[in-house]
Image (cartoon, grey):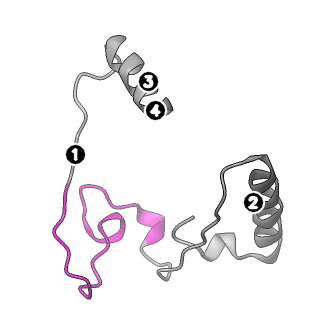
Amino acid sequence: MFSSLLYSSACAADRFDEVPIHTWKIESESGFFPERDDPRVSVEWLKDRPSCGIAFSGGGTRSATATRGELRALNKLGWLDRACYI
């Protein structure tokens, strides 16, 4: 609900004239990643990184605090520089 309110207030303020949307039909084993392989939306520095992601769970203050500590440790160990997705 919060994101809906935020989106509605942004649209009501005429902050967006047009929002570009891209969709891709990707087969499960294709190896195609739009952020790496589509020149319209590719992120240059992701091209040389392996497809590695880091995930965190939770939604409260304790999980946010734990995630912050985990991110600091991963950064200190150099793992954040290796990740494509967080």
- The span from disc 4 to disc 1 (Cα, nearest Å) is 22 Å
Residue beneath label 2, please?
67
Residue beneath label 4, please?
1
Q: Disc 1 vs disc 3: Cβ atoms closer than 8 Å? A: no
- The span from disc 3 to disc 4 (Cα, nearest Å) is 6 Å
Q: Disc 2 residue type?
A: Thr
Badge 1 marks a residue whose secondary structure is: loop
Q: Disc 2 vs disc 4: Cβ atoms closer than 8 Å? A: no
Q: Main secondary structure of the magenta part?
A: loop
Q: Tell me the residue at 25%/65% (across/down).
A: 38
In the image, farthest residue toward the top? 13
Badge 4 marks a residue whose secondary structure is: loop
In the image, farthest residue toward the left? 25
Q: Earlier in the sequence, mark 1 or mark 2?
A: 1
Packing grade of label 2 (10 A; few <14, some 14-19, many >=20) is some
Task: Tell me if residue 38 is in the magenta stretch.
Answer: yes
Task: Give the label, 2 or 4, closer to the camera.
Answer: 4
Task: Give the label, 1 or 2, closer to the camera.
Answer: 2
Residue 83: give its label: none
Residue beneath label 3, please?
5
Q: Disc 2 vs disc 3: Cβ atoms closer than 8 Å? A: no
Q: What residue range appears in magenta?
A: 23-46
- The span from disc 2 to disc 4 (Cα, nearest Å) is 24 Å
Residue beneath label 1, please?
21
- The span from disc 2 to disc 3 (Cα, nearest Å) is 26 Å
Packing grade of label 3 (10 A; few <14, some 14-19, many >=20) is few
Badge 2 marks a residue whose secondary structure is: helix
In terms of image quadrants, where is residue 12?
Answer: top left
